[in-house]
Amino acid sequence: MNGYHPSRVEIDINRLQLNISIVRNFIGKSLYCLPVKANAYGHGLEKIAKASLEAGVDFLAVACLQEGVLLRKAGIESPIIVFGAFHENQIEDLIRYDLQFSISSQLKARWVKEVCEKIGKTCQVHIEVDTGIQRTGVRPATALFLLEYIYSSPVFEPVGIYSHFATGDGPGHPFVYHQIELFNELKRHPDLVDKKLIWHLANSGGTAYYPESHFDMVRPSLLTFGYLMDELPSALSGIAPCFSLKSHVSYFKVVEKGKGISYDHTYTTEKESRIVTVPVGYGDGYPRALSNKAEVLIRGKRYKIAGTICMDQFMVDIGNDEVFVGDEVVLIGTQGEEQITAKHLATLCDTNPREILCLLNNRLPRKFSP
Ligand SMILES: *Cc1c(COP(=O)(O)O)cnc(C)c1O
C-alpha cells in the first residue's frame, strides 16, 4: 500500500474459513472447488486463494488465463481450472502454467492437440457440456464424440466433465432438475461408466438447494463468501459474509434549507442540515445507481446517501446529528447493531451481490484479518 487510504475493503479470513468448513461438512465426500475469478468476487485473488486452500478447498477455478497465471506467480500449486473458453493464442501458456482448462468443441480440442504435439507436453482438461445455459459447452449429444477424440490421443489427460446451471440461484426450480437429469443421462452412458472423471455441476445454489447436483465436486463461490439469494438449509445457516467496505468522513458542512446537493442537484435539503462527505465513489466501483438509495452507517446509525454519487465521493445528510470528520463510515458490513449487506445493495441496483462485490476495485486497499 502506498500510504494511508481512508477507505478499505476488510476481509475476515476467520469467517471465510468458517464458511468453508460449514460447506465442507455439508457436501460430504464431494470435492470442493472454489471459483476465485474476478479478484475472488472482489475479495482479493491471492489471499483468498491461499486462505481457502489452507481451510481445505481442493481445487481453485478462474475465468481466464491471466487469473490463473496470477495464482501461479503467487506460488499457488493446487489444481486450478480455467473455465472460460480459451483463445487459440492462450493454449501454450495454459499448458506451461500447469492450468487445467475447459474443452468445449472438437475444433478447440484439435488446436490443443497440435500445440501439445508441437511443444511436447500433455494437458489436463475438463470437458464442458452445455445442459441448458446455451453459453459455452458441447451439447450432450455430441459430448460422446468429443470424449472419444480426447480419449484417443495421449496428449490429453481428462480430469473432469462439467456443466453449469442456468437458473440455479434459488430452490425448487424445475429447469435445474432438467439439467441434472441431462447430466445424469450422460454419466450413465455405457461408454463413460468406467471412465475415471470428476463430474461437477453445482454452483452455490446447486450446492445449497440441490444435493442431487453435488456429484464428485461442487463449485460454490457466492455461498463460500457468505451470500445466497434465499433462505439457506439449516445445516448452512451459520454462513455469513466476510466482506466489509469502510471509509471515514472526509468533510463536514452545514447547508441551508432548499439547497441542491451534488451533481445535477438530485437531492434538496428539506431544512438546514449537516452534510458530510465520504471519499468513495463509482471510480472505486461503488455503483452510481445507488445515488439517493443506499444507506451508510455512521456512529451506529443509518443515513441515506444525499444526491448523486460522484466518481470519488458522495454526500450524506445527517440532519441535526453529531458526526465528526474522521468518523468511521460503513458502506457494507456492520457497525453497532446495524448491518448493510452487499445483497441489499444488489437489490437496490436490480442486480445480484456478485456484481456489487466484484465491481469494488483495487483502488480500495484490501485489509485481511487476521
Ligand atoms: C463462477 C462460477 C461458479 C460459481 O458460481 P456461484 O453461484 O457464484 O457460486 C461455478 N461454476 C462456474 C463454471 C462458474 O463460472
Image (tube, rainbow, N blue to C red):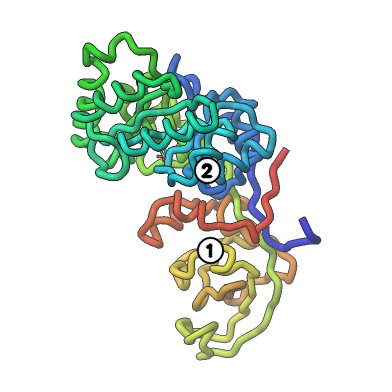
Question: Looking at the picture, which amino acid does disc 2 mark?
Answer: Leu
For residue 188, which quarter of the picture?
top left
In depth, the one of 276 and 336 nearer the eye is 276
Disc assigned to residue 286: 1
- The residue lying furthest to the top in this view is 194
Identify residue type, mark 1. Tyr
The relative height of residue 140 versus residue 320 in the rendered view (above or below) is: above
Which image quadrant for residue 172? top left
Residue 291 seen in this snapshot:
yes
How many neighbours does mark 2 have within 10 angstroms: few (below 14), some (14-19), or many (20 or more)?
many
Ligand 1 lies under 8 Å from the Cβ of mark 2: no
Residue lying at 47% horizontally and 72% vertically, measured from the top left: 291
Horizontal placement of 142 versus 329: left or right? left
From the image, which quarter does the C terminus lie in? top right
Seen in the picture, residue 321 relative to 46 is either above or below; the reply is below
How packed mark 1 is, by other alpha carbons closer than 10 Å (few <14, some 14-19, many 20 or more), is many
* Disc 2, SS: helix
In the rendered image, which quarter is residue 230 located in?
A: top left
- Whichever of labels 1 and 2 marks the residue nearer the N terminus, that label is 2
Q: Quadrant of the N terminus?
A: bottom right
